[in-house]
Amino acid sequence: MTQIRVSPEEVARLGAAVAGLADDLRWSADHTRDDAWALGRGRSRPTLVEVVGDFERQRLLLGRALAELGDVAQRAGGGYVAVEADVGQAMGSGGGPW
Amino acid sequence: MVRPLPVEGDAGVVLAIARGLGDQGARLTATTRALEGVSRTVAQDWDSPAGAAFAARAAAVLPVVSRIATRYAAAAAALRPLAEALHAAQASSAEALAEWDDAWPRFLAASEAMAASQDGADPGRQAQAAGHRAVMLAQHERYTCAERRNAAAHELWQQADERCAAVLGHLLGDGLADPWAYDALTATSREARGAGAAVDLLGPATWLPRLKWLDAVGTAGDAVALVADAALLVGYHQGSSGALALRAASLATGPASGVLKRGATATNPARRLVAPVRTRAEARARRRMPVLERFKAGARGEYDHRVHGIPDPPPRHPVALTAPPRTLPGAAAWVKGQAKARAAACARTAFLDDWALASRGGPAARRMLVAAWTVDGAGDPLASGANRLVAGREPPYQVAGPDGTDHAPRHPGPTR
């Protein structure tokens, strides 16, 4: 039996946040690489580029995993909310505690 | 003489990078905590293929996200003092270079003037050579002092750069780029794919929650009380779901739920033919049947199904069944896959199609269907489908998606 007691709204919101993280990570890595010139000619510049870029393969995988995770969470939370609302409306209880 | 070099870089941009990485790290940390919290809850309370898929994927993602969060936060912390040092070094360098730019031409001019005075035969001009020399020395002091200040600014910057590079270099040793993270994501992703495939296959059926009021359903009672309570609720809007206390005796619930479900999903084709409808509301009203008619239709359909063995209508979309493999090692995977496909079909047929159809029949039909789900206990669709496969007594189930089209005459779904 499917059973969920976590707040569906929270799950849906979390899903949206998680899905957005993948884009944030890519944006952050790209922009940090582009702006690294601002660090001057020292050792920090190439090291910073490595810090945001040496796990590129993992980041791509992570982006895919986050997108899937966010999708699952959004669908689960959204589906839960929709069904509860529909059933609550049908029962004339307005979705209150049964 | 070559003009000293300024300190390169842009402190404002470095600060912006630090701010961006810091914000990113904070978001990642917050998300990690939220994911951990939800995963803990999921492990306890979200018992479904979707929950399993979520937990498996979260487990793969969490350690990687956590390390990235730490890396970004630490990088931001290292960059902030670097930005401050860069700002201070550039300010000092700019001031020193401005001094140098002013002193250097004056020094050159004084040098030339002194040389000219010394070379001349005029005693008056020769006397001015000492003055020119004094100016030359003063300007020399100014520009060399500016060079030293510029060098100190470079030194300040280099020290800050070394410190920052050391911290950043240390972060590279956090193992994020090592194969474990890649393996964790890919391996766990492979493990999660089984549950994930079930989610994709089952679609929204796996998100269907256990209705809260099912918890109030007891296990003792009789069919009479059950049907009476359900009729009271469905037909006359009396009582509340919470107080309904439907007592679902397993032997009695099959026919009762069948009646309710068939009644809920019944359509009224005769009414549709009376006159053309102009609006959606009119069409919806036309499809609605009185509760009594629904009970009659449900009872008649259930009687035909159980007594006369009238088969259900042919399925619209066949389940992807494939021929069994000839080798034993492949047989287990085949059985598992087929069970999943059958279970998915059962889940869809049991819940979503009925709900879509009942939704078009108005509130009474929905209430009736909800009562039917309650009566028959809404058992685990996966287990139910697997049991049917093992029993092997039923023909392959078919998937009928909730696509909004009319299904009449309608398969009532598997009767438990």
Image (tube, helix red, strand yellow):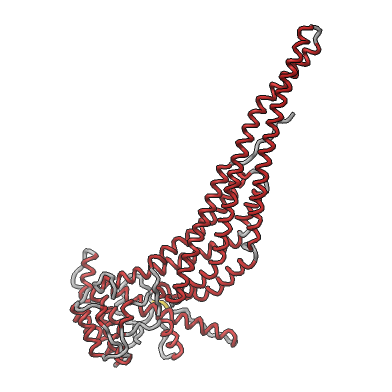
Quadrant of image for the N terminus of chain B: top right
Tell me: residue B194, above or below residue B82.
below
- Is residue B193 shown to the viewer in this render? yes
Residue A98 appears at what percent x and percent y? 28, 76
Up/down of B309 relative to B411, above or below: below
- Residue occupying image coordinates x 76% and y 7%: B124
Residue B354 position, x and y percent, is: 32, 77
Q: Quadrant of residue B9?
A: top right
Q: Nearer the viewer, residue B195 or A2?
A: A2
Q: Name the residue rendered at 50%, 53% in the picture.
A: B23
Q: Nearer the viewer, residue B371 or B243?
A: B243
Tell me which corner region of the image, top left, top right, bottom left or bottom right, holds residue B115: top right
In percent of width and height, residue B352 lies at 35, 75
In the picture, measured across the screen, residue B160 lies left or right of residue B364, that is right
User: How many numbered callouts?
Assistant: 0
**Residue at the image position 41 percent from the left and 62 percent from the top:** A13
Q: Quadrant of the C terminus of chain B?
A: bottom left
Query: For this view, does B340 lie left or right of residue B247?
Result: right
Q: Position of residue B392 (x, y in %)?
A: 44, 90
Q: In this rendering, does residue B254 appear at all?
A: no
